[in-house]
Amino acid sequence: MRNILTICSKEMNSYFRSPIAYGLMAFFGLVTGWFFYIATAYFVQNSMKASMMGGGGPMNVNEYVVRPVLMNISVIGLFIIPMITMRLFAEEKRSGTIELLVTSPITDLEIILGKWLSALMMYCAILAVPVLNLMVLFAFGKPDWKPMFVGIFGLILQGGALLALGSFISNTTKNQIVAGVGTFAVCLMLWVLDWVSSFESSAWAKVISYMSVVAHYEPFSKGIIDTKDVIFYLSMIFFGLFLTARSMESLRWRS
């Protein structure tokens, strides 16, 4: 466990010693802040119209603000994750330090978990920026906090799954750009797989649609923790880390 935390700490320091972390946090905060503003403005405008016309009860802030913002965050995260993972192993290979790493008295599992955990922590740090926006709602209203935190939990699971796949892709090349583009392509594919369900209802279409990471996040955005969605994300994490471990084994054998 100590080796894992040491590697994680080293990777986190490398993120924050460069403009990567600050640039990603600024970009993510700007984009998600705009989504939050649009959702809030829409909610306020329609609430005022409803009250002036005397129609119905108060609008649900979770349904009209929190859920749309969380769904947009989950999609924007697909573009951020490749930038986090592209350097995990590719930079080690480019600089030639990967040989020292795989021949050191550290197991492959410790290396992989340490790097993946650092990427997940970096992702959580980036998520903290839009979460601060959502916290503002408690100062001016009474949103239900439970669905909100379930949605954030789902974002972390989704991010962990894609980061595991990105770690594997980064371990297959020494070029960070190739690693980033490859991870983005995989993330984009796992996003659009659900589109087939809009025009096809056969068994093969349902199987393909089931592989969509965004489709499995939708229940979380509603505040629902479904066991099948949790298992799906955990399985993807295991699968991505397993592929990374097999790739690391080949590196250690060649070294």
Image (cartoon, helix red, strand yellow):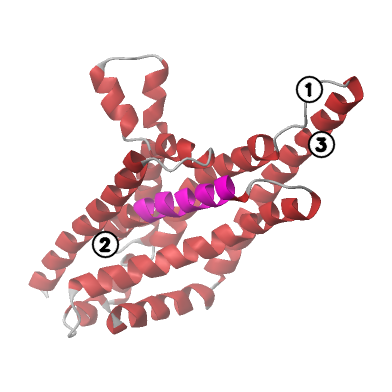
Q: Which of 202 and 171 lies nearest the eye of the viewer?
A: 202
Please state, as top left, top right, bottom left or bottom right, where the C terminus lies in the image: bottom left
Q: Residues within 10 Å of mark 3 (few under 14, many from 20)?
A: some
Dominant secondary structure of the residues highlighted in magenta in the image: helix
Vertical relation: 115 (above or below) 31: below
Residue at image coords 29%, 55%:
169
Indicate whether residue 157 is drawn in magenta. Answer: yes
Vertical relation: 206 (above or below) 62: above
Vertical relation: 255 (above or below) 172: below
Q: Residue furthest left?
A: 253
Tag 3–tag 1 contact (CB < 8 Å): no
- Residue matched to label 1: 56
Name the N-terminal-most of marks 3 and 1: 3
Circle on res. 171:
2
Foreground label between 3 and 2:
3
Foreground label between 2 and 1:
1
Residue at image coords 34%, 55%:
166
Give the distance between the C-alpha atoms of the residues marked 2 and 1, in whole angstroms: 56 Å
